[in-house]
Image: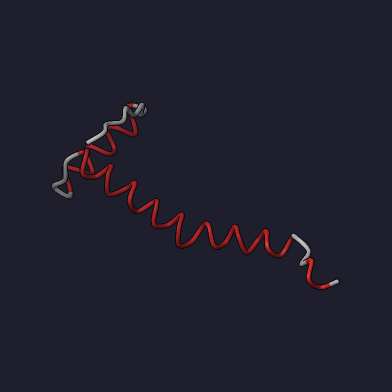
Amino acid sequence: MPAINLRLSARLLEETDRLCDEIYSSRSQFIRASILRNIDICRNVEQPAIREFYRKRIPDPNLH
């Protein structure tokens, strides 16, 4: 499996570790789940909203 190197502030890492302890998750499992959740939000919420925003801004060439 490919690896990535993340630079996190000490405060963010401490908060992540504290939460991982609370939910009985490893740091890697937590970060993977967070990335998957963000990908899902981008695909299903943000991208459609951005497309709709630009669709309304660009004139429809078929209306002329």
Left or right, 25 with respect to 55, comes to: left
Q: Decide: is 59 above or below 11.
A: below
Provide residue 42's location: percent of width, then percent of height.
Answer: 46, 54
- Furthest residue to the left? 24
Left or right, 61 with respect to 29, comes to: right
Quarter of image, res 8: top left
Residue under the image location 22 percent in, 39 percent down: 28
Which image quadrant: the N terminus?
A: top left
Residue under the image location 34 percent in, 29 percent down: 6
Provide residue 2's location: percent of width, then percent of height.
Answer: 26, 33
Q: Decide: is 24 above or below 17.
A: below
Residue under the image location 74 percent in, 60 percent down: 57
Q: Nearer the viewer, residue 51 or 10?
A: 51
Provide residue 31's location: percent of width, then percent of height.
Answer: 28, 42
Q: Nearer the viewer, residue 47 or 12?
A: 47
Which image quadrant: the C terminus?
A: bottom right
- Furthest residue to the bottom? 63
Quarter of image, res 11: top left
Provide residue 60's location: percent of width, then percent of height.
Answer: 76, 67
